[in-house]
Image (cartoon, grey):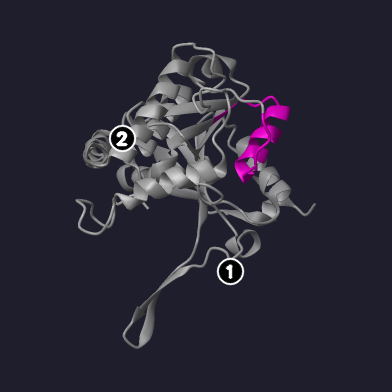
Amino acid sequence: MEDPSGLYDVVADAGVVPDGLNLVAALTGFTDSGGAVSQLGEYLLDTLENTVVAEFDADILLDYRARRPIITFDQDHISEYQPQTLRLHLMSDELGQRFLFLHGFEPDFQWERFTAAVIELVQLFHVKTTTWVHAIPMPVPHTRPIQVTVSGNRIEIIDALSAWRPSTQAPANALHLVEYRLQELGHPITGFVLLVPHYLADTEYPATALVALESISSATGLIFPTDRLREESRGFVAKIDEQVETNAELGRLVHTLEERHDAYMEGAALRSPLTDVDGELPSADEIADELERFLAGNRPGDDFTDGDRPA
């Protein structure tokens, strides 16, 4: 394997980063249900003081044809080029507590070398703990709190917060490998998987960013401003509820998901909040059918703006 340090440049004096900070990681890529990771990154970078500490080389790690950069075409010329970025930021929370935030694109290539590079940075800055988040679609109702599956080696957090603990195989993302390697080294690592209502997975669902922040707080003690997200979440859910009230088929779907969720959370015999009364997971086709029925109720003229219409 080539030298991992060739993947990134430290662009700030290492002395400006105190030893023993918490590292938070959130990468966009394979799945970002509800826009959890993208909203989280945008919210933190917009609302908190931050400085770029290190930047990864997109030309090495990114497949540009899969995730094309954005250009601005102004009548007869290109006025702006917006490349994909992957950066390590030094940030301060609402109380002035500093932490490191790794955010940007999920690498398409050289995962082992990227993981080794992250470990180098963890060791360079004597990182105290690492916490990362992502979100996946699940047949759960929006009328119940978003639950999380917790992984890693911090058992107290897993015991306190992990609502669903499956034994399964699933496609990995790059931070799964980072977690796996850091766990081998005995470094304190926590991963949060948000279980997002499948019928809202392709839209920006503000509650996902809120739960991501709450999860990070529980693992790190960091405190974040959340008033704006809470207000946006209330408004978004109110619009979804209006749709449910006027769409009988969607109402039945949500009611069924509520029953499954509540039975599981009350300790019933169901293996997970996702199974039906016979203990079987809905098939991909069944989930797709449910989503299509939901979308059928959201035609032009409904009371959604383009930014918050379920996609």
Q: Nearer the viewer, residue 58 or 30?
A: 30
* Element carrying mark 2: helix
In terms of image quadrants, where is residue 170? top right
Residue that appears at 44% across and 26% down: 147
Query: Would residue 105 be counted in the magenta stretch?
Result: no
- Residue 160 is left or right of residue 304, and the answer is right
Residue that appears at 67% across and 44% down: 115
Q: Position of residue 130 (x, y in %)?
A: 56, 31
Count neighbours of disc 2 (C-alpha within 10 A) and say few if under 14, some if 14 to 19, many if 20 or more: some
Query: Sequence-wise, which precedes: disc 2 or disc 1?
Result: 1
Mark 2 or mark 1: which is in front? 2
* Element carrying mark 1: loop
- Residue 153 is left or right of residue 307, and the answer is right
- Residue 98 is left or right of residue 158, and the answer is left
- Residue 64 is left or right of residue 287, and the answer is right
> What amino acid type is highlighted by mark number 2?
Gly
Q: Nearer the viewer, residue 303 or 213?
A: 303
Question: Which residue is denoted by mark 1 in the rendering?
Answer: 65
Q: Position of residue 19 (x, y in %)?
A: 54, 31
Distance between the alpha carbons at the discs numbered 2 and 1: 40 Å
Question: Circles 2 and 1: CB distance less than 8 Å?
Answer: no
Residue 271 visible in the shown view: yes
Residue 144 to residue 207: above or below: above
> What amino acid type is highlighted by mark number 1?
Arg
Q: Which mark is residue 251?
A: 2
Residue 90 to residue 4: above or below: above
- Tell me the magenta residue range: 168-191
